[in-house]
Amino acid sequence: MDLPIIQVGGVLVSPDIITKTFCCDLDACKGACCVEGDAGAPVTLDEIGEIEDALDTVWSDMSAAAQAVVDRQGVAYNDRDGELVTSIVGTKDCVFTCHEDGICLCLLEKAYRNGKSKFCKPVSCALYPIRERRLSNGLTALNYHEWSVCEAARKKGAAIGLHVYEFLKEPLVRRFGQSWYDELTFTAAEMRHQGYIK
């Protein structure tokens, strides 16, 4: 049975975010989401400012090709749909990717985790596989994006019983606040009680 879209604190939430399981498995996917696709990660104007503030911190760790792209067009550009996205090298790699032990990581997040920067990474990256969209009526919609490179994450999430909204607690709280997330978990509990999720 198809479940209806859920509204949580004025945000439209796809039921898949509550019912589907997910847990990143970097050992299996090697961070493919940072290098696959045909455009960078969606960013806001505020995030571009924060990335520019953090640029000096990560600059020396960026590849020469990535530095050249940023010198030429900045940390972000408008993609073919007119959306602001992070700059990429060639046709795929985000300029802020780095590789350690065969795994692709984010230089921005690495600097943040090491206490060298106040900015972690774009919310769109942190929220993946959730995609946020602003609707014409002013409402925000959250949809679950199913991508083949994340098959291992779906399997791992199913194995440990972790749902998308649970896996993404930290970025959801960062984006919408703790009270909003509490309302989301209450909604999930109600759906579980009604037998929609296990």
Image (cartoon, rainbow, N blue to C red):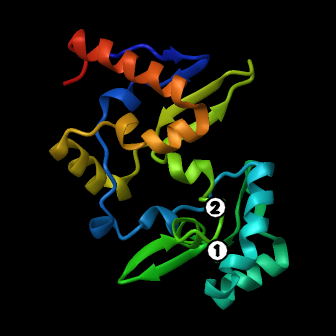
Say whether residue 182 is left or right of residue 75: left
Q: Give the percent coordinates (x, y) of residue 134.
A: 69, 31
Depth order, front residue of 115/74: 115
Quadrant (top left/top right/bottom left/bottom right) for the C terminus: top left
The image quarter in which residue 53 lies: bottom right
Residue appearing at x 51%, y 45% in the figure: 127
Instruction: Assess disc 2: are there few (<14), some (14-19) or many (≥20) residues with their C-alpha within 10 Å of its C-alpha.
Output: many
Q: Give the percent coordinates (x, y) of residue 91.
A: 62, 72
Residue appearing at x 57%, y 73% in the figure: 107
Asked if residue 55 is positioned above or below residue 61 in the image, the reply reads above
The nearer-to-camera label among 2 and 1 is: 1
What element does badge 1 sit on?
A: loop
What element does badge 2 sit on?
A: loop
- Give the amino acid type for the residue marked by disc 1 in the picture: Val
The residue under label 2 is 40
Asked if residue 132 is positioned above or below residue 97 in the image, the reply reads above
